[in-house]
Image (cartoon, rainbow, N blue to C red):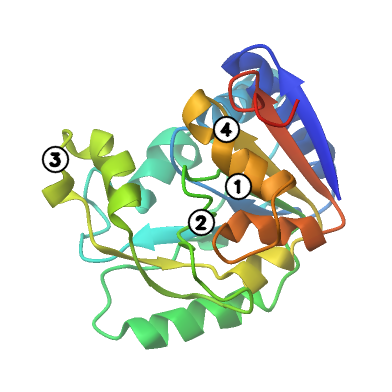
Amino acid sequence: MFNVVIADDYDLVSSEAFKIMRSVLTKEKPVLGLATGSSPVGLYKKMIADHKSNNTSYKNVITFNLDEYIGIPRNHEQSYYTFMHENLFDSLNIPEENIHIPRGDCEDMEAECARYEEELSKYVIDLQVLGIGSDGHIAFNEPGVSFDSLTHVMELTEQTRRDNARFFDDDINEVPTHAITMGLASIMKASKIIVIATGANKADAVYGMVKGPKSSDCPASILQDHDDVTVILDNDAASRII
């Protein structure tokens, strides 16, 4: 079931997302599923501001990130490990041992997938934050991936790599070709999900997620089967569903 919220600009989109996040943070030991990319940055800024202004504590929070590039070290400026620390973790009091990010620098990626899924299975994610790719992918689950997928290695499509080239000096050749990602079935285990999307380039994917047929051609359409999904959009991203 989708609850669609449309806001006039990115800051208001982020504020709507933070309202939901704040309600989850009242739990004794919240478990958060976190995303990277430009979509959740505004939400993370509001979490940091709340922590600094209101002394909201994150010492009992446990986090799981969706994905990580394969083939670049953790200290690479575009690794998701670096992204999360620079944009969120370094400004909060989450203990490092409570932070879970899959590793993309392992020799045995199958073993890393199994390890990460096993760690996930010990918890229920209270709130999973998602963005959506222009081709309808969530996390790095590209079109065609099985709805039953657990944490796995994914070959990235040219479209995804082209979309992400802006983070690599607009050079697609610098964008990794593979990633480790939570699977769609892993994501669906979360109690509550928010999807943040802005911009006209996301409008088709949002339509496919909310109103299109449930199909692996649009991986995000699996969310039609979840009981509690809030989709937070600006006017451009919502243009095809209003």
Instruction: Tell me how far mark 3 sits from mark 4, CA to CA.
Output: 25 Å
- Asked whether residue 96 is in view, the answer is yes
82 vs 140, left or right, is left
Q: Are marks 2 and 1 in contact (CB under 8 Å)?
A: yes
The residue where tag 4 is placed is 203
Query: Which label number is shown at residue 139?
Result: 2
Asked if 93 appears above or below 51 in the picture, the reply is below
Image point (21%, 60%), residue name: 73
Residue 235 vs residue 9, the one in the foreground: 235
Q: Nearer the viewer, mark 1 or mark 4?
A: 4
* Image spot of residue 124 (x, y percent): 76, 67
Image point (70%, 61%), residue name: 214
Q: Nearer the viewer, mark 1 or mark 3?
A: 3
Three-letter amino acid code of the residue under disc 3: Asp
Q: How packed is label 1: few (under 14 Cα within 10 Å), some, or many (20 or more)?
A: many
Instruction: Tell me how far mark 1 sits from mark 3, CA to CA.
Output: 25 Å
State the SS at label 3. loop
The residue where tag 1 is placed is 130
Could you tell which of marks 1 and 4 lies nearer the N-terminus? 1
